[in-house]
Image (cartoon, grey):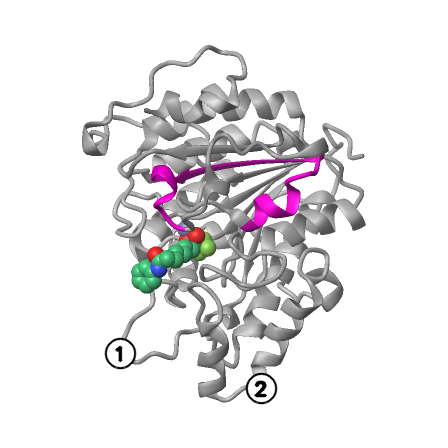
Amino acid sequence: MLPAHPPAADNVPRTTGLVYDVRMKFHASQDPEDSHPEDPRRIWRIFEALTRAGCVNRCLRIDAREATAEDILLFHDRDHHDAITNSASLSPLQLEKLADQYDSIYLCPESAFCARLSCGGLIELCTAVVQDRVRNGFAVIRPPGHHAERVGPMGFCLYNNVAIAVRHAQHHLGVGRVLVVDWDVHHGNGIQEAFFESPDVLYVSLHRYEGGEFYPSSPVAACDVVGADRGTGRTVNIAWPCAGMGDRDYLHAFEAIIMPMAREFAPELVIVACGFDAALGDTIGECNVTPAGYAHMTYLLKSLAGGRLVMALEGGYSLDATAESALACVEVLLNTNMDAPAPGPQPASANGVPSLPVLPPLTPSLACLETVAL
Ligand code: 6DK
Ligand code: ZN
């Protein structure tokens, strides 16, 4: 168990940790006809924005390492691990055939290496935060992870970076309760699967659901799915009924649902599955969250777990919006933007759906979330 408020080591600058390894760009779609939205430039553009704003110099760089088989087997089964590992030596045609066995996956010879770096980079950042070498941190990693299931890759995700990092923190670093907030616009079915029966992981996802029509188009993303056995009540699906949600909707969910539950849960570590595809301008997510909205959510989460907050990139397909949103989050992590303003006026919600009504201040009944959102 970690102390709630660790004493700051005298001679160690407890700054923000940053994971970025340019080699993660080698995972790339081989289809010359079609540009894929999970584009290698995503991480480069984030790093460029952080550099220009002077953030990289103020962060402590944490080196990514390749996750080991032991790390990956903390969540995935052996067949999944081996299939990705062995993909490195396949021909282009064999790679295409393998990728086609899965839902929304592309593979190239370097994909397995990049997936190991992505996962190992997040493990290293979590370790640095838990060991108080840095106060908090941001992992600019790809491929993303939150859809990857125990038995196979899915939805642009090869290994489930966040699920593996949580297990690593609990099994090897003495961490007890972990809060995972997944604000990628898609439901993180893989993270939910990993901790569905775990009392020590509170998984909260905000995502477009639309009666199960929006990707990953599964009923497990519904708001009445709440975990099982000893994990009952530790899965919270804030399932939006339509596109067009913006800062007011997200911040209302934070104030009314997520922060009260999180305070009750008292996590020792907070990890954000940090997709920026709900950002204004993202044509896959079709929502309206602004950089100020992301900054504000980051600011709220910093108040938990003695500030031990780790953010792990997931999706986000507008190169501009993703870079600006990530920068806004890192500025809050670095404390430069402590006065993150309450988001101002924003475009009206789509489809004529009014913004959320005020909820009572106590933890609401989970089964009524979609009713509330409507
Ligand atoms: N495919 C993610 O953002 C991944 O959650 C989302 C995966 C969506 C798959 C379905 C889909 C397209 C769309 C446009 C062009 C090609 C393929 F895991 C994350 F990366 F975080 O929309
Ligand atoms: Zn997504």
In percent of the image, x 43 and y 51: which residue is there? 216
Viewer can see residue 16:
no
* Image vertical order of residue 329 relative to residue 73, above or below: above
Residue 213 placement: quadrant: top left
Q: 362 or 76: which is nearer to us? A: 76
Q: Is residue 364 above or below residue 344?
A: above
Question: At label 2, which amino acid type do we have?
Answer: Ser
State left or right for residue 75 relative to residue 145: right
Residue 33 is tagged as: 1
**x 66%, y 55%: residue:** 123
Residue wearing tag 2: 89
Q: Is residue 196 magenta?
A: yes
Q: Secondary structure at mark 1?
A: loop
Exactly how many numbered labels are in the figure?
Answer: 2
Q: Give amino acid for label 1.
A: Glu
- The answer to whether mark 1 and mark 2 are in CB contact below 8 A is no
For the record, the magenta segment spans 190-215
Q: Residue pushed farthest bottom?
A: 91
Spatial separation of the CA atoms under disc 1 and disc 2: 24 Å
- In what quadrant of the picture does the C terminus appear? top left
